[in-house]
Image (spheres, helix red, strand yellow):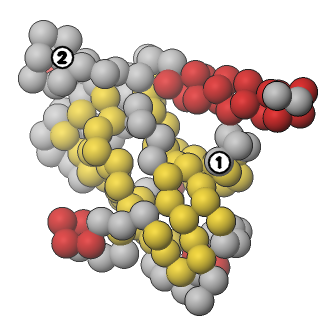
Amino acid sequence: MDRKRWMKRVGSCLVIVVLLAGSAWADPTGSANVAQIMEGFTHTGTPSLSRQRTFLTTDSIIFEAIYYDPNPACVGVAPASVQLLVFNLEGRLLLAFPSSAFTTSLGTKYRALFKDFASVASMPLGPGAFRWTYLVTDCAGTFQIALPDVPTFSVFAP
């Protein structure tokens, strides 16, 4: 393996390790009842009917995930911050959207994290393959967590 390719692979691994630091892997109903982000997916409409990972540049893309925080003080309180991060497949950060751009549901210990783009054209991305994750700081501002699986999506020209 040549040096340039090896450095890209090492860089990608480091980005993923940094994002996943503090990420919880346990089932929220298990003994390790900790905050975590679960079930990240992309779609163009109703999530239960149209989960998808391929889009045209003219499509609307919705990034959605479920956030769980068992801390009693955080019930009904929004996380301190939420960011949507989009990377290329090599791990280079391309886009970061701050919490002011998000809709989160209030209520129980579960929240829907949601970011809608009217079209890929509203995101400065062209055709290609990408990875994405949410980065959430809990309501007390004590830790950050990210999606453990870093999902991918692809964009094609019409």
Q: Could you tell which of marks 1 and 2 lies nearer the N-terminus?
A: 2
User: Spatial distance from mark 1 to mark 2, Cα to Cα?
Assistant: 32 Å
Badge 2 element: loop
In the picture, the quarter occupied by the N terminus is top right
Q: Is residue 72 left or right of residue 43?
A: left
Which residue is under mark 1?
A: 89
Give how far across and how far down residue 158 sits, in percent: 59, 89
- Where residue 38 sits, quadrant-wise, is top left
Q: Residue at x 67, y 23 (%)?
A: 14
Residue placed at 82% from the left, 35% from the top?
A: 5
State the SS at label 1: loop
Residue 96 visible in this rendered orientation of the protein: no
Q: Which is nearer the eye, 32 or 102?
A: 32
Q: Residue at x 18, y 66 (%)?
A: 48
Residue 124 lies, in percent from the top left, at 70, 69
Q: Residues within 10 Å of mark 1 (few under 14, many from 20)?
A: some
Report the residue at 47% width, 41% height from top: 150
Q: Which mark is residue 138?
A: none
Residue at the limit of the structure toward the left, as seen here:
29
Residue 80 at x, y percent in the picture: 43, 34
Q: Amino acid at mark 2?
A: Asn
Indicate left or right for 21 with 47 as reference: right
Query: Is residue 114 something that shows in the picture?
Result: yes
Farthest residue to the right: give it. Answer: 3
Which kind of residue does numbered mark 1 sit on?
Answer: Leu
Query: What residue is pinned by disc 2?
Result: 33
Nearest the viewer among 67 and 106 is 67
Residue 51 at x, y percent in the picture: 30, 66
